[in-house]
Amino acid sequence: MSSTIDEKIRDIEDQVSKTKKNKSTEHHLGVLKSKLAKLRRQKLDFQFSAKSGGGGYGFDVKKAGDGSAVLIGFPSTGKSTLISSITSKESKIGHYAFTTTSAIPGIMFHKGTQIQIIDLPGIIEEASMGKGRGKQILAVARGADMIIIMIEPKKSTQYLDKVLNELRKVAIRPGLKQPYIQIKKKDRGGIALSTLAKLTHMSEKTFVGILREYKIMNAAVTVRSDPTIDELIDVLEGNRVYPKLLILVNKIDLLSKKQRKRIDENIQDVLMISALTGENIENLKDEIVERLELIKIYLKKQREKTDFEEPLIVKRDSTIRDICDKIHRSFKSQFRYAVVSGKSAKHPNQRVGLDHVIQDGDVITIIVKKF
Ligand SMILES: Nc1nc2c(ncn2[C@@H]2O[C@H](COP(=O)(O)OP(=O)(O)OP(=O)(O)O)[C@@H](O)[C@H]2O)c(=O)[nH]1
Ligand SMILES: [Mg+2]
């Protein structure tokens, strides 16, 4: 099965790369790209399904901590050296490639947070096609809150593109935000497209043509951004994940000032470190915590004082439901209401439900059913 899918994918990839991008080919490109996305999804579903042996390779990592970050990169870039330096976990370090052979989770304690850092085997090109342990590695990456890409100082731009490409092929969109496109399907009436900003990447005709590729003929569509064709397809595919991204160039102890400067100029938003000497490691820890966008909230038991000693650390835009999940499994099923004071509350002691979105510094009491 997969070989014919591969052939079809290559064929369309070929057509896309041969098509010059301009106004007259835009519609055609949109349709081709939708077809490609659908084929890639079929392949992905096949690869990651239980049938093809998705799990059970010792790669099942149990979630822990307030957020998680995975280390992704080619072999011998220093991933295990780094995890051994920022967590208490020792992951085997070797001067040869493929030292790490499974997922090794550790916990980084920093600024009152506990972040799960996961060391992974090195990936190789075509990891997304299942080469090496690509399938298992990328499956772990899909579940993480943050992707830390680790690259060698030499040919860093080229390597970065290759790693990003493998991630994109398995529907991971590191560092991107999900574009706001709301689609409400209807029974009739065609497509009613309402845009808040002018579409500059495609015409309305192309937009509707792509919807049609996804068999959406009648719908009210609200677009609050100016999506590219790829972004629109991402939304329609629906299986994309949008983790945070941190790009690291390691081994800068081997570089001159001039070489460092060149990397800084060539790669946007890059952090240069040395996992070996510890250079810039404190900065790195700060960046991980900051980019995960964690907030602190305080719990108050009924008729007791607020616990300001031990805040609960959760992701930004978490809801009361997420808080319940974090405290105890039974909280959600026994939930009656929550009482919130702080930035997210209209007034002190506001009563709210499970969907209420909390904010940094909120004081929260959860009221559960009595037995
Ligand atoms: N000079 C220098 N060498 C480093 C640095 N970080 C790691 N190394 C060396 O690079 C080699 C590979 O390090 P590892 O940490 O095993 O690399 P890895 O990315 O985990 O490799 P795989 O598990 O095979 O994918 C070892 O010889 C390390 O000592 C660094 O910052 N500077
Ligand atoms: Mg390793």
Image (cartoon, rainbow, N blue to C red):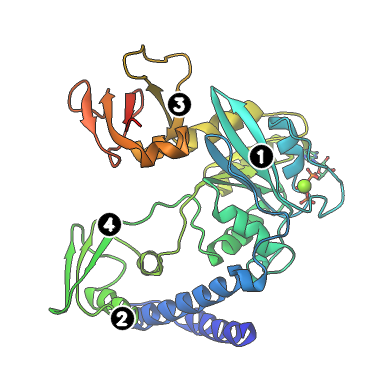
Q: Residue at x 55, y 67 (%)?
A: 169
Query: Of the residues shown, which amino acid type is indicated by label 4?
Result: Ser
Task: Provide the residue designation for mark 2.
Answer: 215
Q: Quadrant of residue 227?
A: bottom left
Task: Provide the residue designation for mark 4.
Answer: 225
Q: Is residue 130 above or below residue 35?
A: above
Disc 1 crowd rating (10 Å Cα; few below 14, some 14-19, many 20+) is some
Image coordinates of residue 90 in percent, x first then y, are: 78, 36
Per the model, the C-alpha gap separating discs 2 and 3 is 44 Å
Per the model, the C-alpha gap separating discs 3 and 4 is 34 Å
Query: Does dot 3 land on a helix, a strand or a loop?
Result: strand
Per the model, the C-alpha gap separating discs 4 and 2 is 22 Å
Q: Is residue 107 above or below residue 62?
A: above
Task: Provide the residue designation for mark 3.
Answer: 312
User: In the current view of this chain or complex, which residue is farthest to the front?
Assistant: 371
Per the model, the C-alpha gap separating discs 1 and 3 is 39 Å
Q: Residue at x 52, y 77 (%)?
A: 42
Q: From the image, which quarter does the C terminus lie in?
A: top left
Image coordinates of residue 58 in percent, x first then y, are: 73, 54
Query: Of the residues shown, which amino acid type is indicated by label 2?
Result: Lys
The yes-or-no answer for disc 4 within 8 Å of ligand 1 is no
Disc 4 crowd rating (10 Å Cα; few below 14, some 14-19, many 20+) is some
Task: Provide the residue designation for mark 1.
Answer: 260
